[in-house]
C-alpha cells in the first residue's frame, strides 16, 4: 500500500572514494528508512560519512572519485542507484530537495534572488505541467518504439505503450507569466520569514547575510515541494545567533510543510529539537537507530553514550569535561572487528575479532514507533549501565 | 494582434538596458582611464561608420590618390603636416590623413572580426571540452580530441603560418584574415575551458544539479553566465592585439599591398619604412603607427572598465559609492497597506451602516 510505503529506504548502501591508488569506504553497509512525514536525524563526528550519505541519496557525488559500491536507494519504489544519469534530474529537486551546508557558495553569484528562486519554481512548474519530463514512481511503461527491447519477464510486470503512442501526447507550454513567478517567489520568501521580500528580490547573493542566504536556499528547496528534503548541516556554517534563527525556522517549517526530512548534523542538541528518529554514524557505519527520545533516554551503543555524556551543559560542573579518548579512525586503516573498539571503555575480546552485524532498519508498521536498534555486541548491557 | 505578454517583455528589455546604461555611466565616471577608453572607442566606431557610409565628410581624398596639387616643378611632393594635409603628404603626393582614415574600417573590422570569430569558435569548443571531460566517456573523448587539436594549432608560429598561407593563396585581406584566425581561436579554447573547469565544481553548480536542473541548462545558464565576464573582457583587450598582429603581418609584406585600392596601417608603415629615412620624413610612419597605438589602447582601456561593469559586486559598490548623496527611497508599502486596509474597513463599516 502506498500509504504505508516509506518515502525513502536505503538498503546496505556502501560508497567508496577512489583516490589515487587507495580506496576509502566512506559509507559502509548503511540501511535507513524515512517514513512519510517524519524527520530523521543523522549525527556523527566529522568524517564519519554523513555528508557522503546525504549526497549519495540523490546521487550528487561526483563519480569518479566517488563510487556506489553496493546497495539500494529506493525512493518511492524506484531504485535510484539503477536510474541512468540522464534521468536523475527528474528525481532531484521536485522529488528529493537539498539544503547545503555552505550558504555562501551555494547561490549563483551572477543571479539575483528572484532569478534563483524563480528557476526552482519554474522547474517544478514545468515538471508538473509536462513541459519537462517528470518522475513517476513505480514501474514505468515500456515504449516499444525505443531500443533495447524488454525482456520477457519485464513484459509481464510492466504496462506496454504501443509504438507511436508518444506522439499523441502534446507538450503543454507553460502559461506562467513573470508576474505569476514573482508572486510565487514572494510567497516563498515570506514563508521563510524574510522581511521586506520586495527589496530582497532584486539583490545579489553577496549582498545578503549568511542567515538570509540560508533562508533563500531553504526557500529554493521548498519551492519545488519535494517529497523528501535532505538538510545537510543547514546551520553549521552560521554563527550561533543566526543558527538559532534558522533552526527555529526549520522547526516551524517542519510543522507547516509536513515533509519527510533527512536532517544531517554534528550537533546532538539540534537534532534533539528537530528530529523524530535519530541515527548515529561512526566511521562510515550506522551504529544506532531509534526514536530520538529513546536514544537520549537509554542509548544502546557505547559511542552514543559517550557522545551524550560529553555534551556540555551549564548545569554540569564536573571537570575535566568528559571526552571520548582517541579520534575517528582513518578510513584507510580501519580497526578490525567493531570500528569503535579501540576507543570503547567496554571493549571485550570479541569486539576486536568480529564486527557486530550491520543495522537492519525496518519501516515501522503504521502507528508503531520505530524499533530501537544498536550495532553493538553488548547492546542490552550498555542500555542497563548507569 | 499583440500578445498580452508582449508589452512586459519590451518594458523589461528597456528596464534592463536603462539599468545597465546607468551602471555603465557611473562606473565610467568612477574610473577615468576606462572613460578615456570608452570615448576613444566611441570615436573610432563613429568614424568607421562615417567612412563606410559617407567618406567625403571626413576624408578629403580617395585611397592612395595623388592629390595633384604639387605636380609642377620644382616639386616638393612630401610636405610635412599642414592645415591642408594634417598628416602630411608622401613622395607620391598622397594625403596620409586620408589613407589613415580610409584604413580604419578594415583594421577595426579585422580586429573585431577575428577576435569575435575566435570567441564563438573557442567559446563553444572550450565549453564542451571543459564541461564534459570525464575520462572514459564519449564526452571525455570529444574533450581530448578538441584539446589535442587545439595544441596542434597553438604550436604553429602565427607569422610563419601567415607567410605560408599568403605564399599559397596570394596576398590580400582574406589571406591575412585566415592566417591570423587559424592561430587565434585556440587561445580562447584554453581560456574558456580553464574557466569552465574552475566554475563547474563550485557548490552553486552542485546546488543547481540538486534542484533538478538538467546538464544542458546548467551549462548554458549557470556555467556560461559565470564564465562570460572574463571572456568579454579578454575579447575587448584582444581586439587591440589582433590589430597589432595584423599590422605586423602587413608590415613583413604578407598582408595587403600598399599603395593599392584599400590602405592598411601596417602595410603603410611597411611601405614607408623601407623607402625613406625616419629622421627626415618622420610623418610618414608616425601617423599610421599612432593610429594602431590609439585604437589598441582604446580597446584595452575599455576592457579594463568593462571588468568592473560586468562584475555584480564592483558594479553595485561603484553605483552606491557614487549615489550616496541621494536620499534612500521612502518605503511606502507598509503605510500604503495600512491606509488601504483602514479605508476598506471604513467602506465595510459604511456599507454595514447603510444596510
Image: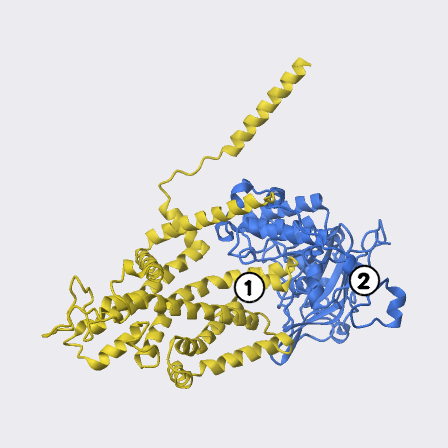
Q: How many marks on residues?
A: 2
Q: Are marks 2 and 1 on the same chain?
A: no
Tell me the crowding category of disc 2: few under 14, some 14 to 19, or many 20 or more residues within 10 angstroms, Cα based: some
What residue appears at the point 66 percent right and 47 percent down from the top-left corner? Answer: A175
Quadrant of the drawing holding the C terminus of chain A = bottom right
The residue closer to the viewer here, A50 or B249, is: B249
Q: Is B240 placed left or right of B222 in the picture? A: left
The residue closer to the viewer here, A152 or A354, is: A152
The residue closer to the viewer here, A102 or B225, is: B225
Distance between the alpha carbons at the discs numbered 2 and 1: 34 Å
Which corner quadrant of the image does residue B204 belong to? bottom right
Quadrant of the drawing holding the N terminus of chain A = bottom right
Applied colour scheme: by chain
Please give the letter of the chain rendered in blue.
A
Extreme top residue here?
B354
Q: Is B44 placed left or right of B312 in the picture? A: left
Q: Chain of mark 2?
A: A
Colour that chain B carries in the picture: yellow
Q: Which mark is residue B202?
A: 1
Q: Is residue B37 visible?
A: no
Extreme left residue here?
B74
Q: Position of residue A19 (x, y in %)?
A: 61, 76
Label 2 belongs to which residue?
A140
Extreme front residue here?
B72
Q: Is A305 placed left or right of B339 in the picture? A: right
Above or below for B11 versus A370 = above
Q: Position of residue A71 (x, y in %)?
A: 76, 69
Q: Position of residue B336 (x, y in %)?
A: 53, 30
Amino acid at each position: 500500500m502506498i500509504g504505508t510505503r516509506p518515502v525513502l529506504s536505503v538498503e546496505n548502501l556502501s560508497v567508496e572514494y577512489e583516490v589515487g591508488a587507495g580506496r576509502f569506504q566512506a559509507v559502509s553497509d548503511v540501511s535507513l528508512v524515512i517514513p512519510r512525514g517524519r524527520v530523521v536525524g543523522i549525527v556523527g563526528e566529522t568524517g564519519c560519512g554523513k555528508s557522503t550519505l546525504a549526497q549519495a541519496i540523490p546521487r550528487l557525488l561526483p563519480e569518479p572519485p566517488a563510487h556506489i559500491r553496493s546497495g539500494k536507494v529506493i525512493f518511492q519504489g524506484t531504485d535510484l542507484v539503477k536510474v541512468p544519469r540522464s534521468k536523475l534530474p527528474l528525481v532531484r529537486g521536485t522529488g528529493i530537495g537539498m539544503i547545503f551546508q555552505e550558504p555562501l557558495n551555494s547561490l549563483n553569484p551572477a543571479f539575483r534572488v528572484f532569478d534563483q528562486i524563480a528557476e526552482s519554481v519554474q522547474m517544478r512548474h514545468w515538471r508538473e505541467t509536462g513541459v519537462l519530463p517528470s518522475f513517476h514512481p513505480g514501474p514505468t511503461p515500456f515504449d516499444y518504439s525505443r531500443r533495447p527491447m524488454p525482456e520477457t519477464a519485464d513484459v509481464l510486470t510492466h504496462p506496454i505503450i504501443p509504438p507511436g503512442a508518444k506522439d499523441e501526447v502534446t507538450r503543454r507550454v507553460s502559461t506562467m507569466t513573470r508576474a505569476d513567478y514573482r508572486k510565487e517567489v514572494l510567497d516563498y520568501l515570506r514563508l521563510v520569514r524574510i522581511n521586506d521580500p520586495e527589496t530582497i528580490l532584486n539583490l545579489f547573493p553577496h549582498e545578503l547575510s549568511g542567515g538570509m542566504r540560508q533562508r533563500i536556499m531553504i526557500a529554493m528547496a521548498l519551492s519545488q515541494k519535494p517529497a523528501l528534503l535532505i538538510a545537510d548541516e543547514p546551520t553549521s556554517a552560521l554563527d550561533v545567533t543566526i543558527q538559532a534563527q534558522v533552526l527555529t525556522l526549520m522547526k516551524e517549517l517542519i510543522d507547516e510543510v509536513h515533509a519527510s526530512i533527512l536532517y544531517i548534523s554534528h550537533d546532538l542538541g539540534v537534532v534533539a529539537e528537530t528530529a523524530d528518529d535519530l541515527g548515529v554514524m561512526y566511521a562510515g557505519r550506522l551504529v544506532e537507530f531509534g526514536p530520538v527520545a529513546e536514544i537520549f533516554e537509554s542509548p544502546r551503543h557505547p559511542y552514543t553514550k559517550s557522545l551524550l555524556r560529553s555534551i556540555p551543559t551549564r548545569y554540569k560542573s564536573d571537570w575535566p569535561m568528559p571526552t571520548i579518548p582517541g579520534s575517528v579512525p582513518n578510513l584507510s586503516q580501519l580497526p578490525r572487528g567493531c570500528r569503535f573498539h579501540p576507543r570503547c571503555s567496554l571493549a571485550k575480546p570479541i569486539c576486536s575479532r568480529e564486527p557486530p552485524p550491520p543495522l537492519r532498519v525496518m519501516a515501522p508498521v503504521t502507528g508503531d514507533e520505530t524499533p530501537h536498534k544498536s550495532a553493538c555486541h553488548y547492546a542490552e548491557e550498555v542500555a542497563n549501565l548507569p | 494582434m499583440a500578445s498580452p505578454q508582449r508589452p512586459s517583455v519590451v518594458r523589461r528589455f528597456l528596464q534592463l538596458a536603462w539599468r545597465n546604461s546607468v551602471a555603465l555611466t557611473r562606473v565610467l565616471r568612477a574610473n577615468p582611464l576606462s572613460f578615456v577608453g570608452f570615448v576613444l572607442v566611441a570615436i573610432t566606431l563613429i568614424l568607421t561608420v562615417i567612412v563606410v557610409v559617407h567618406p567625403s565628410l571626413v576624408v578629403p581624398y580617395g585611397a592612395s590618390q595623388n592629390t595633384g596639387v604639387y605636380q609642377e616643378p620644382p616639386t616638393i611632393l612630401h610636405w610635412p603636416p599642414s592645415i591642408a594635409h594634417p598628416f602630411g603628404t608622401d613622395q607620391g603626393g598622397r594625403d596620409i590623413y586620408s589613407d589613415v582614415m580610409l584604413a580604419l574600417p578594415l583594421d577595426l573590422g579585422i580586429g573585431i572580426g577575428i577576435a569575435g570569430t575566435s570567441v564563438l569558435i573557442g567559446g563553444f569548443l572550450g565549453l564542451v571540452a571543459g564541461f564534459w571531460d570525464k575520462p572514459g566517456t564519449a564526452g571525455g573523448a570529444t574533450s581530448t580530441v578538441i584539446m589535442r587539436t587545439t595544441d596542434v594549432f597553438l604550436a604553429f608560429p602565427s607569422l610563419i603560418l601567415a607567410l605560408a598561407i599568403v605564399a599559397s593563396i596570394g596576398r590580400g585581406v582574406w589571406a591575412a584574415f585566415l592566417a591570423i584566425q587559424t592561430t587565434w581561436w585556440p587561445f580562447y579554447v584554453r581560456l574558456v575551458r580553464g574557466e569552465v573547469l574552475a566554475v563547474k565544481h563550485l557548490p552553486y553548480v552542485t546546488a543547481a544539479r540538486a534542484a533538478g536542473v538538467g546538464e544542458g541548462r546548467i551549462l548554458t545558464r549557470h556555467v556560461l553566465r559565470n564564465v562570460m565576464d572574463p571572456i568579454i573582457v579578454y575579447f575587448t583587450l584582444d581586439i587591440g592585439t589582433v590589430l597589432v598582429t595584423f599590422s605586423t603581418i602587413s608590415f613583413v609584406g604578407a598582408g595587403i599591398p600598399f599603395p593599392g585600392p584599400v590602405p592598411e596601417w601596417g602595410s603603410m608603415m611597411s611601405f614607408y619604412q623601407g623607402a625613406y629615412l625616419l629622421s627626415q620624413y618622420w610623418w610618414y610612419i608616425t601617423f599610421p603607427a599612432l593610429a594602431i597605438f590609439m585604437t589598441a589602447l582604446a580597446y584595452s582601456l575599455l576592457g579594463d572598465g568593462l571588468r568592473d561593469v560586468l562584475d555584480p559586486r564592483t558594479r553595485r559598490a561603484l553605483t552606491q559609492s557614487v549615489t550616496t548623496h541621494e536620499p534612500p527611497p521612502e518605503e511606502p508599502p507598509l503605510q500604503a497597506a495600512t491606509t488601504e486596509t483602514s479605508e476598506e474597513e471604513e467602506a465595510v463599516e459604511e456599507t454595514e451602516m447603510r444596510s
